[in-house]
Amino acid sequence: MEDITFSLEEGKFYALVGHSGSGKTTLLYLLALLEQADAGEIYWRGESLRGLSPAAAAAWRGRHVGFVFQFFHLIAELKVWENVVLPAVLQGQSFHSHKKRALELLSKVGLQDKAEVLPIRLSGGEQQRVAIARALFLSPPLLLADEPTGNLDNEQAERVWSLFLDLTRQLGTTVLVATHNLALANSADQIFYLQGGRLRQNL
């Protein structure tokens, strides 16, 4: 990738599209500081993030970014609500001190009645909605999603996509979703298109 310059406005929903291998995942990982760029700068609210130590990058990411992957990465041995609470537990907090918050988020994604079951009892679309609730648990201002509908059928994909739209409108979360599905991407506030390592905007 080269000569990529763009900015995201708070509370808007963006789609990142491009063919497989175009660099969508790499760009999301760079924005989340999961990978380091060879050159260039990434700014967060006017401050450069370049040069942060791994520990500082992880701390920044924990405060500001939620990440949803194509594969749900739910813990099979944990109940649905426990999976949602996991970000707080990884910071040393207890499961039960945050159960109420988990139930509130599950209600937002339409799964409060599934809180006590194990992930294996859920459909793919339901598991992805749990993953979205988990990504939102610490109220990050930025939500990044990498092909979150890639393993879902059309009906489930549309439901998950509508959820991203609702989250942007209701919570004011800035959302950037990588997808190969142009039909879904057209409902975003703005589309970024990666082609040949370059980013084209305003399609």
Image (cartoon, rainbow, N blue to C red):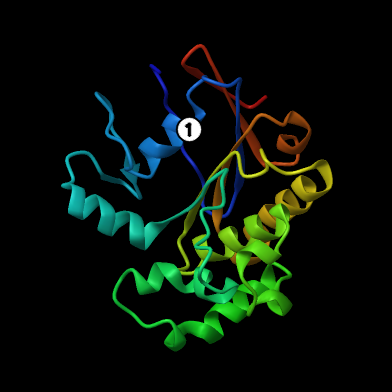
| Vertical arrangement, residue 186 with respect to residue 91, above or below | above
Using the image as rendered, state which of residue 126 and residue 181 is in the foreground: 126
Q: Quadrant of residue 62?
A: bottom left
Using the image as rendered, state which of residue 140 and residue 6 is in the foreground: 140
Residue 172 can be seen, yes or no: no
Query: Residue shown at 42%/23% (left/top)?
Result: 4
Which residue is disc 1 drawn over?
Answer: 25
Along the horizontal axis of the image, is 20 left or right of 122?
A: left
Along the horizontal axis of the image, is 26 left or right of 119?
A: left
**Identity of the amino acid at label 1?**
Thr
Looking at the picture, how far across and down is residue 25, in whole percent? 48, 32
Query: Residue shown at 61%/80% (left/top)?
Result: 103
Query: Residue shown at 38%/16% (left/top)?
Result: 2
Along the horizontal axis of the image, is 28 left or right of 118?
A: left
Other-residue count near label 1 (Cα within 10 Å), few / some / many at <14 / 14–19 / ≥20: some
Q: Quadrant of the N terminus?
A: top left
Q: Quadrant of the C terminus?
A: top right
Looking at the picture, how far across and down is residue 180, in whole percent? 66, 29
Farthest top residue? 196
| Vertical arrangement, residue 100 with respect to residue 62, above or below | below
